[in-house]
Image: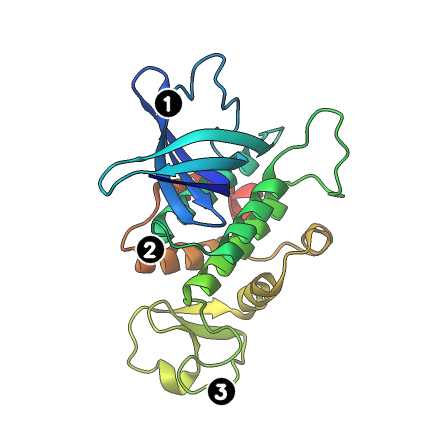
Amino acid sequence: MSAEKAQALVLQARPFGETSAIITLLTREIGKVRGLAKGAWRPKSKFDAALDLLSICQVLVIHRSSGNLDLFTEAFLEHRFRIGRYESSFAAGLYIADLLDSVTVDADPQPELFDLATRAIRFLSAPRPGQRTEQRFAPDSRLVSALIIHTELGILHQLGQLPSLYCCAECQRPLEGRRISFSMLGGGGLCQRCRRGKRSVVSVSSEAIVSLRQLADSFDQNEYTLQPEPPFGEIRAIMNTLFANILGYRLKTSHWLAKTFPSSREKHR
């Protein structure tokens, strides 16, 4: 058996026996790892809250022989996820954790993906009582929607699956017009010539494409608080379809997003 220390984000935790738990972690140094934390849910556990869902921690992993679960023997909390006043933040955190668990494989470290995920989780978490925060605005549903899409696009980039947003995915001509053909299976935007005869192509508004370009580049909370709301409902449908095609199924947690983030049309009914 060998031991490694790693910085980790808790993606999943499920009970094992009365007081132990099987934990799935995304780590910066060794990738995704699943292991047993003995006594993790005892009232006075040595792990404290370090292995709670969406916590960021330093963990000591004992690697066991093939076919056996690894062991987590020590964990030190760096950041505990706090729900605060906004249910949308918690729903977003659960969705991001579920998505990361689905698109990653064990023992394949991707530091940039880990950094992207932990930035998102820290932003979504409410501050401790009395803690001063650098965020100028509370993470309301508009900001959370933008952050989710930014994180999804970052994940697609790390997977090599980021759709073409500036030029045709086939001939590289610039994408122009009020409506743009977008191939869910063929790499993103298509010009009118390359669109012919293609399956799974939808018509997307130029406003949605512009928002996707901005969110693929960066996430600026000031921008999405002060400007008119982007067409999040349209963008959400695109992202759901893209990941359903990659995974072969739709994540259950994506249905929570539809309930937690109503479309602009529903908001004004």
- Front position among marks 1 and 3: 1
Relative to the observer, which residue lies in front, 111 or 11? 111
Label 2, label 1: how far apart the Cα atoms are: 35 Å
Color style of the picture: rainbow
Amino acid type, label 1 = Lys
Q: Which residue is mark 1?
A: 38
- First along the sequence among labels 2 and 3: 3
Left or right, residue 227 beside residue 265 = right
Left or right, residue 225 beside residue 5 = right
Q: Residues within 10 Å of mark 2 (few under 14, many from 20)?
A: some
Amino acid type, label 2 = Ala
Vertical relation: 246 (above or below) 268: below
- Write down the quadrant of residue 206 in the picture: bottom right
Label 2, label 3: how far apart the Cα atoms are: 27 Å
Residue 228 at what x, y percent from top left? 68, 56
- Front position among marks 2 and 1: 1
Residue 63 at what x, y percent from top left? 34, 40
Residue found at x 30% / y 77%: 198
Residue found at x 28% / y 81%: 197
Relative to the observer, which residue lies in front, 125 or 58? 58
Left or right, residue 183 beside residue 257 = left
Residue 94 seen by the camera: yes
- Write down the quadrant of residue 85 in the picture: top right
Determine contact: label 2, label 3, CB under 8 Å: no
- Where, quadrant-wise, is the C terminus in this rendering? top right
Residue 234 seen by the camera: no
Q: Which residue is mark 3?
A: 173
Q: Residues within 10 Å of mark 3 (few under 14, many from 20)?
A: some
Residue 61 at what x, y percent from top left? 42, 37
Vertical relation: 170 (above or below) 55: below
Residue found at x 53% / y 54%: 151
